Image (cartoon, helix red, strand yellow):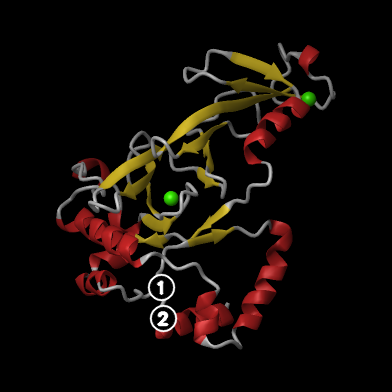
Amino acid sequence: MRDRKRIILAMIAAGCIFAGGCGIKESPAEGSTAETEVSEAAGETAEEAADELPEIDPEAWEIYSAALEAMFSQNIWPDGKEIDEEEYKSRGDFSENPFAVCDVDNDGREELLLHVTTASMAGMFEGVYDYDPDTGKITEEFVVFPAVTYYDNGTLKSEWSHNQGRGAKLWPFTLYEYDPGTDTYIRRGSVDSWDKDFVAEGFPAEYDTDGDGTVYFIYEDKNLTDRKTVDGEEYHQWLDSYLSGAEEIRIDWQDLKAQTDPAVVSRNIRGIARPLI
Ligand SMILES: [Ca+2]
Ligand SMILES: [Ca+2]
């Protein structure tokens, strides 16, 4: 941990990286290797260490940094919509909601992500915002309940806010795929499951061909009425058709808190790395 802190301090001293970026997430099995690499990196120069992190495009950072500042000074979301103060600023410390800047949709340009939970259950959201390089104008690309996993092929998995089904092992989710033509995410399908151990009565055993006590429901329509019941093999084939070969993106979330300090914001806009710790 100390080594990690030292690296971060070295990066700040180098003044050449931005916080709030992202990378490819190490799988749990590779976690110990990653730790070793971090420790070894402590012996490198600040420049070498900083080179290992993806940098945020200064133009994107300038636009997004100003948008983050405006959330406090003008009470508007990055796309210009007014923030409902009673919903979002009276239920906790708004500045503790995290943000990140990362190319989550794999189109080569970074998005601004907001993960907002200082709200009622219905008001909580994760937003993906993009900007037009010609005008600097920010638009909302995607918004969903804040339980999202992004993959480096432009797919994302959005877990439902509630699990009211008969499955205990799999939390229901919806898969979305980025569509470059519209610069938005397209819904590809939702998945729920039924575990016989959890609810035995009425379990559709005729679909449980592998006999493991679990079947899956794939919904291809938005209203979740067109349900296809499948077993594990077909479910995994469906999932692999979107996620095979894709890596989960590690999002480097940062509190909005630092953005409330005008001096920090000013430094950001000039393109100098802001404090990480
Ligand atoms: Ca992008
Ligand atoms: Ca099964």
Name the residue type under label 2. Answer: Ile
Q: How far is disc 1 from disc 2 in space, using C-alphas?
A: 8 Å
| Element class at badge 1 | loop
Q: Which mark is residue 276?
A: 1
- Residue at left offset 41%, top offset 55%: 110
Q: Earlier in the sequence, mark 1 or mark 2?
A: 2
**In the rendering, at what x and y percent does residue 23 appear?**
54, 61
Q: Judge by depth and name the residue closer to the eye, 87 or 271.
A: 271
* Labels 1 & 2 near each other (Cβ < 8 A): yes
**In the rendering, at what x and y percent does residue 181 appear?**
41, 36
**In the rendering, at what x and y percent does residue 112 appear?**
36, 53
Q: Which residue is mark 2?
A: 12
- Residue at left offset 47%, top offset 31%: 186
- Residue at left offset 62%, top offset 76%: 38
Name the residue type under label 1. Answer: Leu
Q: Is residue 151 left or right of residue 100?
A: right
- Residue 6: in sight, yes or no? no
